[in-house]
Amino acid sequence: MPVRIPILAILTLALLPTAHAADLWQVWQLARSNDPAFRQAEATRRVSMQDRPAAWARLFPSISLNASRTWNNTSSSALRFFGGSQVVPVNSTSNDRQDQWGAQLTQPLFNWQLFQALRGADLSVAQAEARYHATIQGLIVTTAQAYFNVLNAQDNLNADRADARALAKQYEQVTQQYKVGLASITGVRQAEAGYDQARARVIGSRQALARAEEALRAITGRYVKRLAAPRAALPLIPPHPARVEAWVTRGLSENPTLVASRLGVRIASNLVAQQQAGYLPQLSLVLSHTRQSLSGKSAYSFGGGTGFASPNRSQMSNNQIALQLSWNIFSGGATRAATRQAEFQADVAQARDIAARRSVEQQVRNAYLAVLSGIAQVQATRQSVAASRVSLQATVAGRQVGTQTMLNVLTARKDLLSAEKSFYSARYAYLIAVLKLEQATGSLTPASLKRLNGWLVRAPAAASAPPPAAATPQR
């Protein structure tokens, strides 16, 4: 018992939707288990999978049973002529029960509409598979986007906090210098305004982080913090092959959305064939067995009341083998109207396929360029951060010797903050661009996400705690 209590407590806490540390792969596993969009995609896929057995079922024999019981009560009266001149009234009554049951087997021998429906079911299942893979790829990108949005918001918040602490310290220094006559009131007011703006940016960054965490929670079903972040030496790998046309060709061949669109064209053409099959005859083999039994009695009376009664009993069975031919010669133009409607639907599917093809080609080209520009932006913003940091140090040193003003220092610090945020955004934009290029070409899988997860490092437990807030200067 002393051992079971801690274990039960640990399991209970593990099931609660509380915050915990995780990397990109673990967050993907949470999303796959909890995201309603993924569950809907799986359910839709299972629904479509039943099209094939349903189509086959219509080609297999169908067996039906029937049974009935009928009670009959009949009475009649008539005049009968005997000997040419004698008229005798005859009355009769009968009460009987008729039991009947039967079985019938029907096997389609030729039904072109059913054969075409079977082909259409195979196409529908293939289309459902393509749409399912497209949904999985979309969920991968959506999860990664939400994951990196949280990291980006956290980086921006940390940068704003560090900037606020530096400006608070600078404001205190300028205030002390003003008291001893080494700074002007203008410099004090400029430092104060810079510090107030930094505090406002911290508040905005906190709200942005909260929104990003809520977006991730909507996918995973729980709050996840202390996320693994990109390591300092982030691999910047250009697309291979280094020809955009090769990527476009692959996208036009393997993109699951485009594959589903092409299957939609074939499904529409198959529907036309199904409707045209309504002009053809249908031939079926029908086997039936019927058994009938009758039990009861009949009574007859003549003239003055003399008569007789007799029981009614009979048994009958019947076996039939039949070839049943049906041919819809004319149905008011319904078959023609259904065929034309299917042809128009095929035209719609063709137009959608052309639009999907152009959209996929555009996505591939944009994603390819996004990866290349992402690499360049990461490199450029990294150099910009280094240059801005050197510029800030030089500006601070210049102010100490009187060659720079407080406004110059604030501007240099703002430039450094902007460069840092641009660097953070460029890194995450590059990672998303890598995933979107694979998504556009249809090669994105959970293994791609796991490979990307290898570029991340887990944040230490202390990293989740906010840095200490700067003391508010005395005004």
Image (cartoon, rainbow, N blue to C red):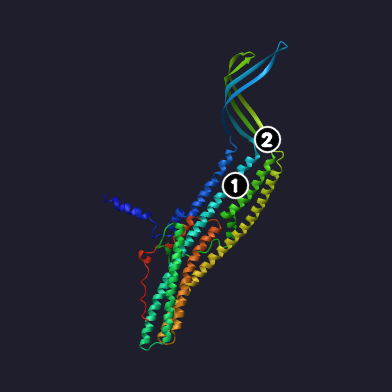
Q: Which residue is mark 2?
A: 326
Residue 132 visible somewhere in the drawing? yes
* Image spot of residue 2 (x, y percent): 26, 51
Between circles 1 and 2, the one closer to the viewer is 2
453 vs 90, nearest the viewer = 90
* Image spot of residue 250 (x, y percent): 58, 57
Disc 1 crowd rating (10 Å Cα; few below 14, some 14-19, many 20+) is many
Q: Residue 246: which quarter of the image?
A: bottom right
172 over 122 or under it: above or below? below
* Image spot of residue 170 (x, y percent): 39, 80
Question: Given the image, on which type of amino acid does mark 2 rest?
Answer: Ser
Residue appearing at x 59%, y 15% in the figure: 309
Q: Which residue is mark 1?
A: 123
Looking at this view, name the residue that lies furthest to the right. 84
289 vs 194, nearest the viewer = 289
Question: Given the image, on which type of amino acid does mark 1 rest?
Answer: Leu
Dot label at residue 370? none
394 over 264 or under it: above or below? below
